[in-house]
Amino acid sequence: MLTPDEKAVLRRIDDRKEELVDCLRRLIRFRTVTPLFRGRAEGDDYAGLQSFLSDRLAGLGFDVEMWEADASTLERFPGCGVVPDRDLSNMPILVARRERAGPSLLLNGHYDVVPPGVVTNWRHPPFDGVVENDRVFGRGACDMKAGLAAIVEALRCVVEANGEIPGTVVVESVPDEEMTSMGTLVCCQRDVRADAAIVPEPTDLQVLVAVRGSLGGRIVVSGRAGHSEMAQIPWRDGGPVNAISKAARVVEGLERLNAEWATRPDKRHRYLDPDTIVATMIRGGEWDVMVPERVEITFDSMFVPSTKDKRAEIQAGLDSIAHDDDWMRDHPPVLEAGDYLYGAEIREDEPIVRAASAALTDLGLESRFVGSGSLTDMVHLINYSKIPTVCVGPAARTAHAADECVTVDELVTTTKALALMILRWCGGPDRRRSG
Ligand SMILES: [Zn+2]
């Protein structure tokens, strides 16, 4: 049930639909692509986007702080996923606060986006923010500049229609979620806190309560070089060993690992798929007429939050693959992996989860709990800062794809859901109704 105050705020959001769409289009026009793993942020306008948000939030009475982080100074611990030599300069972090007596709420969004891919596969240029058929197109449209626009406009409409936000609101706009999630970790390690947090990542307007953790790395497979066109002596007598053939066995072995994890009870989760490991890149061989002596398999592994040590599980898998092969028993594939990033989940009876559910229900939606195979910055908010956190946002179907877009409807609904949650959460425990 909506109160008259809440109805007034929702009406205000409908009245300001044009401004909401305009805000998103302007955010899309700031090109803010995440640099490659060893790359550096250059040519994109991260600072421009942050200044734009800073002006809007300052206009709503927020105290805004902006700074550049240094990844090498971050505290490291199991599950942190820290890449100490990642260059975060030019990608400022923004934290804005509006402090009042009463419960506090953190609204977190990442402003970095994945690259556009093949630009000619887009119907509209990826950084123009074109509106067609009630959809806003552009890289980041749903993931997650819609969420950032919704945060700003929800706050504006609450302030304008309600006169005040009763509690404390903190806004974080962070870089590098698409690569390392270190932007949010920087805020966590600065002890930016609140009683609960919402991340409006795309969730198909459902309540996201669980995400898988991730470990990326490489497996190096060795062989022994030789002339590929001549008769060879047996490898036991010093002859060549084809590293590509051995790598094929490793890839098959990884697929067997997936099949095994899929059946294990400890990998079963109510909202998440079991653990996976996917070979995502392969590089090997040295010359056209040479038996290859080295292959590098890049992998991406995701796992349920209860998984304790994914690296050890992958190592055990590789050990058993090596055990079944005469060459690899003495020349085992080498696992090279950095720090992993933990998964996260939140209980369904947490007040912020019930508030999210109730907001969606009151907007006429069928609210369901969901999990995501890929992680979001909620992992640091939940695990490091111990802040109960949910994700609620627009449809995810075009995230990371050509023609990424968000419908104006989803954008408006996301903004309304955030506004209701702000009003109810910050309004005190009696207004945090369950769903
Ligand atoms: Zn995202």
Image (cartoon, rainbow, N blue to C red):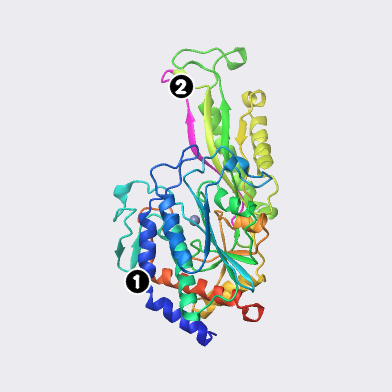
Residue at left offset 62%, top offset 54%: 188
In x, y percent, where is residue 406?
39, 64
- Whether 321 is among the magenta residues is no
Q: Nearer the viewer, residue 278 or 72?
A: 72
Which residue lies under the disc numbered 2?
286
Left of 294 or right of it: where is 305? right
User: Residue 38 bears which disc, if any?
Assistant: none
Q: Residue at x 51, y 84 (%)?
A: 5
Where is 215 relative to 55, above or below? above
| Residue at 37%, 46% in the rendered image | 117
Front in this rendered view, residue 406 or 224: 406
Which amino acid does the dot numbered 1 rest on?
Answer: Glu
Region rendered in magenta: 272-289
Q: Is residue 283 magenta?
A: yes
Q: Which residue is mark 1?
A: 18
Q: Indicate whether 404 appears above or below 167.
A: above
Image quarter for residue 165?
bottom right
Q: Quadrant of the C terminus?
A: bottom right
